[in-house]
Image: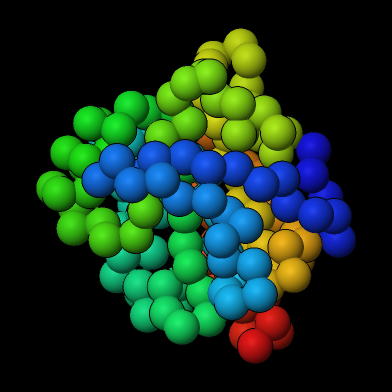
Amino acid sequence: MVDVGEPAPDFELLDQNRTPVRLSSFRGHKNVVVVFYPLSFTRVCEGELCSLRDEIADFSNDHVQTLAISVDSGPTHAKWAAEQGYDFPLLADFWPHGAVAREYGVFDDEIGLALRGTFIVDKQGLVAYKVVNAIPDARDQDAYKKVLASLS
């Protein structure tokens, strides 16, 4: 598993609009909140992503970019983003199935889904914060805000 202080593994995935998003493209410009979630259209995932949406000024601005990642397909992300008003990237770790989640150490091979892992990557590309919760357990987004404030 990727740990605090280590370089964040780079990746490029398609968002809900089929636009490629590469983590390293933010290096030197923005801190990045990388949010792995199990599945779209599920209660806890929706609650977490709606909280990000509702406080988007804290999570997507001149200094921060949020990237949400699941093993769902691009069309699934597109439908969910449209229904929920998510304007931050929902990235498809669809194929190879869960490859990015595996690199970060948050893929559960038994059920084929990512755990609830969040990694805050600083402008230098290093992991400044991480938390990994079991699938039913929502994360504390106030912790993200504290870390982001300390990186400003």
Outermost residue on the left side: it is 83
Q: Classify residue 59 by image quadrant.
A: bottom left
Residue 19 in percent (x, y) is at 33, 47
Instruction: Report the side of 78 relative to 105 (left or right).
Output: left
Instruction: Report the side of 39 relative to 78 (left or right).
Output: right
Residue 47 in percent (x, y) is at 34, 52
**Which colouring convention does the figure follow?**
rainbow
Outermost residue on the top side: it is 110
Residue at coordinates 27% horizontally, 61% vertically from top-left? Answer: 87
Whether residue 97 is situated above or below residue 44 in the rendered picture? above
Image quarter in which the C terminus is found: bottom right
Whether residue 146 is situated above or below residue 26 in the rendered picture? below
* Residue closest to the eye, 136 or 110: 110
Instruction: Report the side of 21 relative to 1 (left or right).
Output: left
Image quarter in which the N terminus is found: top right
| Residue 45 in sight here | no
Outermost residue on the right side: it is 5
Residue at coordinates 60% horizontally, 26% vertically from top-left? Answer: 99
Q: Classify residue 14 by image quadrant.
A: top left
| Residue 82 in sight here | yes
* Residue closest to the eye, 129 or 95: 95
Number of numbered tags placed on the structure image? 0
* Residue closest to the eye, 27 or 146: 27
Residue 3 in percent (x, y) is at 83, 50
Q: Classify residue 23 by image quadrant.
A: bottom right
Residue at coordinates 31% horizontally, 65% vertically from top-left? Answer: 53
Residue at coordinates 52% horizontally, 19% vertically from top-left? Answer: 97
Residue 86 in percent (x, y) is at 26, 57
